[in-house]
Amino acid sequence: MLYDEYLNVGLYLRVSTEDQSRFGHSLDEQDERLKDLCKFKRYNIYKIYREEGVSAKNMDRPKFQEMLEDVRQGKIKKIVVFKLDRLTRSIKDLEEICTFLEEYDCSLESMCEDINTATANGKFFIRMLTILAQLEIERTSERTKIGLIGAAKKGHFAGHLPIGYEREDKKLIINPLEADVIKRIFRMYLDGSSVCSICKIFNEENVLNRKWKTTSIDYILSNQTYTGSIVYGKSVDIESQIFDDVVPVIIDKTTFKMVQKRKEKNLKNYHRKLTYIFMQKVRCPHCGKIMGGSSSTSKNKTKHTYYLCANCKSRINENRIEKPLIKFLNDMLDFFLIVDNSYKTTINKDIELEINSYIKLEKNIEEKTTRIKTAFIEGKIETDILQKELKELEEDLKITKNKIKELENIKTSLEYKQDIETIFNLKEIEKMRLKSTYVKEQNTWNLLTIEQKQYLINKYIDEIEINIDENHNVSIVNIIFNKNEIENIGYMFRNDCFDMIVNINERDIILSNYKNEEEINSYLTNLRNFYNIKETIIQADYIDINDLNTDDVIQIIPQKRNMKFEKNKYTILQIGA
């Protein structure tokens, strides 16, 4: 085992009255033996945390919490205990403690159990304890789920009591007054009333002396409990199960199904009529609230889309947000294209420094071997300890020597590998830059449908902060990107925009990704098995898609350039006669 000389450690000592009388593990005894251990291993004792008469049933212990705080502040890098049960008697707590220590690069060592999480064996033992803890949790969860399912089958209702029912001996019984209100809600909705109108009427009539919300009405219309069923599994990590005819029925199943179909139809109509590119994304420049959608139709029947703030009544035309946003994104995504490429693997590191660190470690191991042998000769350690320590040091020395040899081999081939990596990265950057330039020059964004634009914004952007000056000009202050999509966003946003079907002169045309000549020929061979395809190649810096005769154009394929300063090639595919 490798000892970390002069490592700051904290000694945790705990005893309860029962422990002291039964086992004699007094604080002074623990103190003395742990100090001897630290002296032998040359640990620097930063502080001793003594808990007297305190149980280990939880982690709410003054000195224990003080020790954890010192770990957070980096004051100690190892916790040393006499026995593991001095630290905790709970496997669940032990799992939490080990996770905490790993987060702050601190290890745990137990004298009696020979546990040291700084070693492979120590980590293995702790992992085994963690696995046992997880097994315990899963078994408890399994028993709980089985119990809940059994209760659901018997009609026992767990959770918030739905309007229309009362609870009696864990079961639901109908509240006649409230049940009539539920029936009225379903009837009004099928008669054509919207959720909002039902909510408004109920608040005006003060139905059931409560404040009604649209979310409450919508929840009632979707709640299968009113059909006599209990749905189990919505809030737990298992597949949903439905238990029919276990509670009294308020709404028959036919009526409930008719309402669900009506809701689905209304939802589709809502999305078809009101499509906003930046829905729930734009923050009001005056009050900071998220703006909702609004629209109007002019006399010439042109539809205008706006974003309206319900708080301060500010209204902004969608076009005034879209233009500066795309300009802002173009500049930002060009920068991200270069940043994204930094994720590529590289070995550009200081190998010499790493080799020197292992040479130093090799020297330390040899010094420790000499020191342990001296301790044995002086009678400070027993034969079994000597043999154990020498064996572990011998293994560590072998690993260290192999690592030095491995690094030396890497050093030999470093220059060649760096050259290959550099060439690869430059090609990738050039390929991405070409795609980005093409998207901007061809104004591909403007060729997308509103639904496609909404898809891209919703996928990559969480919020858009804007500003409006005294001349009513809109500028972009900040964009908060979706954290799940931020990696390689420069490339992926352009790629998604690039590969979509675009609408040109009222025709849908496929704007494809870059392909080389071999890929294009293979693609055409397969395509011509089904269609008569005519191929035209245009060579230019760029082409204006809108100038093409698009009556029979089905696809545009940009071709990868063979040389940096070569003009772009575009393969235009058309349906032949």
Image (tube, helix red, strand yellow):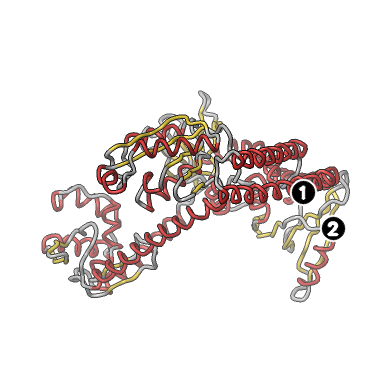
Count of numbered circles in the view: 2
Q: What number is the disc on residue 150?
A: none
Residue at screen point 73% across, 56% down: 513
Q: Residue 380 occupies which quadrant of the picture?
A: top right
Residue linked to disc 1: 406
Q: Which amino acid does the dot numbered 1 rest on?
A: Glu
Taking the spot 31% from the left edge, 48% from the top edge, the residue there is: 23
Q: Which residue is mark 2?
A: 537
* Residue 60: % across, % down: 31, 40
Please tell me whether mark 1 sits on a helix, a strand or a loop: helix
Q: Amino acid at mark 2?
A: Ile
Q: Is residue 22 above or below residue 186?
A: above
Q: Position of residue 138 (x, y in %)?
A: 38, 62
Q: Position of residue 572 (x, y in %)?
A: 79, 59
Front residue of this view, candidates 311 and 92:
92
Other residues around mark 2 within 10 Å, as few (<14) / some (14–19) / many (≥20): some
Horizontal arrangement in the rendering, residue 549 relative to residue 476 (left or right): right
The one of 534 and 419 positioned closer to us in this rendering: 419
Looking at the picture, how far across and down is residue 240, in whole percent?
36, 68
